[in-house]
């Protein structure tokens, strides 16, 4: 389901953000962002309605948890992206959310976005 599908990208590492953007655009998706802060992503949500989102958990100035909460409130699918694995990685209200481990595998990431 590409073409009209918009994917919100929240990633503070410029090279990873550019790589994600190139991959998604190359597969026919429209990228919303990428945003490097939660505040910018929340502001972007006031102008776009993505169908799905990829959220780096730890950003330079905090986390993407508030973005995830807003997406959840709106019924928009999202997955966290992180290189960290820990039992208490997510707060209780976001426990069970999908996690894509970095470095991400293209097939896994595209499978999440497509579903």
Image (cartoon, rainbow, N blue to C red):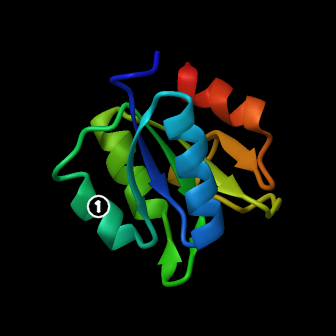
User: Of residues 75 and 111, which is closer to you in this image?
Assistant: 111
User: What x and y, as percent, mark residue 17?
Assistant: 56, 61
Q: Residue at x 48, y 64 (%)?
A: 64
Residue matched to label 1: 42
User: What x and y, as percent, mark residue 35?
Assistant: 41, 64
Looking at the rendered structure, the secondary structure element under dot 1 is helix
Q: Residue at x 63, y 58 (%)?
A: 90
Direction from residue 99 to residue 67 in the image, left or right: left
Direction from residue 4 to residue 63 in the image, left or right: right
User: What x and y, as percent, mark residue 111?
Assistant: 66, 24
* Quadrant hosting residue 55: bottom right
User: Of residues 110 and 70, which is closer to you in this image?
Assistant: 110
26 in relation to 3, above or below: below
* Quadrant hosting residue 109: top right
User: Of residues 100 and 21, which is closer to you in this image?
Assistant: 21
- Mark 1, Cα crowd under 10 Å, few <14 / some 14-19 / many 20+, is some
User: Of residues 42 and 26, which is closer to you in this image?
Assistant: 26
55 in relation to 26, above or below: below
Is residue 56 among what the camera can see?
Answer: no
Q: Residue at x 54, y 64 (%)?
A: 11
């Amino acid at each position: 389901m590409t073409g009209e599908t918009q994917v919100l990208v929240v990633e503070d590492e410029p090279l990873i953000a550019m790589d994600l953007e190139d991959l998604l655009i190359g597969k026919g998706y429209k990228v919303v962002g990428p945003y490097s802060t939660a505040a910018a992503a929340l502001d972007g949500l006031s102008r776009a309605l993505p169908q799905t989102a990829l959220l780096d958990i730890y950003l330079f100035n905090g986390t993407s948890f508030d973005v995830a909460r807003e997406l959840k409130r709106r019924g928009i699918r999202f997955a966290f992206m992180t290189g960290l694995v820990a039992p208490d990685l997510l707060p209780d209200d976001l426990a069970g959310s999908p996690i894509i481990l970095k470095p991400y595998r293209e097939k896994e990431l595209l499978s999440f976005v497509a579903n």
